[in-house]
Amino acid sequence: MATPTLFRRNKNVDSKGVKKTIPSRQEIVSGAFDWVCVILEVVAARLHHEVGGTTSSTSTVALITELGTLCLTSQQNKKFEAVTVEMIHGWIDELSKVDYDRFLTTLKIHHVYDLSKKEVKNLHLKSGQKTAEGREAKSTIETINFVYYNLHPSFLRLQRIKHENPDCFLFVKNVIRRILVITNDQLVPKGTVTSGLHGEGRFVRYCYIQYVCDLTLLDLHVLTPPAKVVYPTPQKVFGNFMQPTRIRSDSRSSSMPVESSDEGFDPESVYRRYEECMSKLKGANIEVMRLYVASSQGTCLDCQKMLGSLKIAHNTHRYSKDTASANWIDPFSWRDIKSQAEPVERLSAVSMGRKKAEQMDVEMGSGSGSEDEDHFMG
């Protein structure tokens, strides 16, 4: 399908009129990337737009492959009430056509290609003004950068994916059978400021809290003293127990598994296997989840480093910013990179997981609790 704007560079300049550049089309397309994550990045961008998100924040999606679950989370703590599995499936069907013009038109941001370099320069000059016109100019500049640094490279890669392995869209679509929304209520005590907790951090923090909760419940109900659960580090949890299968564009030996129907997919068997492994506490044998993470604005360097240490599949390109974040919180310890102070223990993921388990234990004991719908095992 012909998509002229796919090959037309944005007329992007700085406040002095100097052209902003990103790697060439060939370099973007030929570089290493995860096919699943490319699709998820554009899904995250569409999701962010649908809930009225701004380019100063992100929405993040994380695919837990073997549980058929797509996790949604937003730095703005959006609830995503209207988002359904069917809606996500429809978006992926649209992406499989790789129609860049249509996507930009759907998001109502196609107009950035109509701006001249002079107009973009003037927008930069106005964007610093504390007026309505200045705020509008700043918003437009952010949209230009979003299209230029995020959507343009992603669609170039989608085109390569479409050419080399068109079934990958079907694979991602068929895997997604459930939506799980992650909000602050599941991550931190009420009133906690979460500005430094990025979308990727929100997802892995949620997973680790759930994991610690599982182990705590086992400690309370299964193990006999003096036997006691030892909480493994996040690196061991994700690296050994939830290790993903990375599908890289630069590896000829990699192949994309394709599921064209519901046959062979049994979520209940996955849950049973997870529970069995947990109860036996044989961590080395747990290989339950394959994880892929992507954000609407790309993944910052700090989150890239974190995801890499956890062996979670993600894409490393972020053409708009290649420096460390000014404000970033470790999702497990709650340590702020700007602070030398010790993090507050009650905000650690371990403390949150233990507290969650204790609350569940009280509810189960009183008989008034309901099944935890956000729990992986439920």
Image (cartoon, helix red, strand yellow):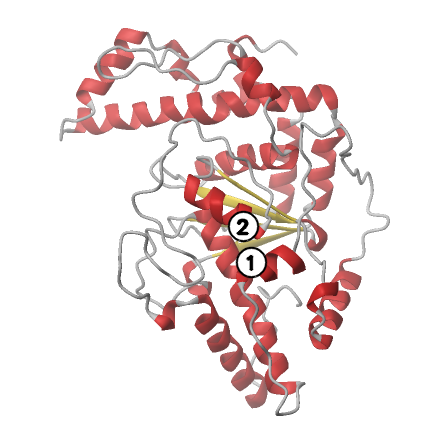
Residue occupying the point 52% across, 55% down? 204
Q: Is residue 143 left or right of residue 206?
A: left
Crowdedness of circle 2 by 10 Å Cα count: few (<14), some, many (20+)? some
Judging from the image, what secondary structure is the residue with disc 2 in?
A: helix
Q: Where residue 133 is drawn, which disc sits there?
A: none
**Is mark 2 in CB contact (under 8 Å) with mark 1?**
yes
Residues 193 and 239: in front is 239
Q: Residue furthest right?
A: 263
Q: Above or below — where is 342 with respect to 28?
A: below
**Quadrant of the image occupied by residue 13:** top left
Which residue type does callout 1 highlight?
Gln
* Crowd rating for badge 1 (residues with CA inside 10 Å; few <14, some 14–19, many 20+): some
| Distance in Å between CA atoms under marks 2 and 1 | 6 Å
Residue ID at (42%, 50%)? 78
Query: In this view, which residue lies farthest toward the bottom?
Result: 225
- The reply, left or right, for residue 120 in relation to residue 303 is left
Residue for badge 2 = 309
Residue 8 picture location, percent across and down: 48, 9
Q: Quadrant of the C terminus?
A: bottom right
Specify whether 168 is left or right of 144.
right
Could one spot residue 53 in this view of the protein? yes
The amino acid marked with disc number 2 is: Ser
Q: Which residue is mark 1?
A: 235
SS at mark 1 in the image = helix
Q: Quadrant of the N terminus?
A: top right
Image location (x, y in percent) of residue 73: 48, 50
Image vertical order of residue 89 relative to residue 108, above or below: below
Please count the marks in the image: 2
